[in-house]
Image: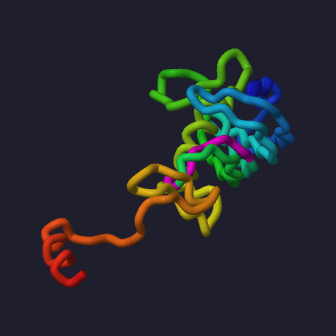
């Protein structure tokens, strides 16, 4: 659920802290579905709200850019976000009746941590550009000889 009751931090003095262990499985964060979210979160009371700092490990399904197969990608995500008590200060995130919701900030941090080009393994051979065969599963039957079509007639003369 990734929603935590932080009402203990609503009244204390600035600087009060609360530590949380996060261990959630099969979470949906907007359009992202993650297998798990695990980590530590330290919440610190400030004069504007609650500062949430944490490090999380997670795993989600992504598509390889070379072979287009789905695979599980493990990520380490750092988070440092301010959750405000009221909307008066135009905050990004609010504490709603003593509840802190990590779904949106965690989704954003996961999106930032995703690699530009996810590859299922470093030696992924990808797809054949001619027939689309997944070259990780074996070679294709396409001709490996690339001949410039403008030189085909010259090849016939040399044969």
Query: Splitting the image into 4 quarters, where does residue 121 fall?
Result: bottom right
Main SS of the magenta part reads strand
Foreground: 154 or 134? 154
Foreground: 41 or 123? 123
Location of the C terminus by quadrant is: bottom left
**Left/right of residue 75 with respect to residue 5 in the rendered view:** left
**Left/right of residue 19 with respect to residue 106 in the rendered view:** right
Query: Splitting the image into 4 quarters, where does residue 50 fall?
Result: top right
Foreground: 141 or 50? 141
| 137 in magenta | no
Which residue is at a point 52% across and 58% down the rendered structure image?
Answer: 140
- Percent from the top left, x then y, of residue 51? 66, 42
Which residue is at a point 59% across and 39% down the rendered structure image?
Answer: 82
Region in magenta = 58-66
Q: Residue furthest top?
A: 97
Q: Residue furthest bottom?
A: 158
Location of the N terminus by quadrant is: top right
- Percent from the top left, x then y, of residue 75? 68, 52
Foreground: 87 or 146? 146
- Percent from the top left, x then y, of residue 158? 20, 84
């Amino acid at each position: 659920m990734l929603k935590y009751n932080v009402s203990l931090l609503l009244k204390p003095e600035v600087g009060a802290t609360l530590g949380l262990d996060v261990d959630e499985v099969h979470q949906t964060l907007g359009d992202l579905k993650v297998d798990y979210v695990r980590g530590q979160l330290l919440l610190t009371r400030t004069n504007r709200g609650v500062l949430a700092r944490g490090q999380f490990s997670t795993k989600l399904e992504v598509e390889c850019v070379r072979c287009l197969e789905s695979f599980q990608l493990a990520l380490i995500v750092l988070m440092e976000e301010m959750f405000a008590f009221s909307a008066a200060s135009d905050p990004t995130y609010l504490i709603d009746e003593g509840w802190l919701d990590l779904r949106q900030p965690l989704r954003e941090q996961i999106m930032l941590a995703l690699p530009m080009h996810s590859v299922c393994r470093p030696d992924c051979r990808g797809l054949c550009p001619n027939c689309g065969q997944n070259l990780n599963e074996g070679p294709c039957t396409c001709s490996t000889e690339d001949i410039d079509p403008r030189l085909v007639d010259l090849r016939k003369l040399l044969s």
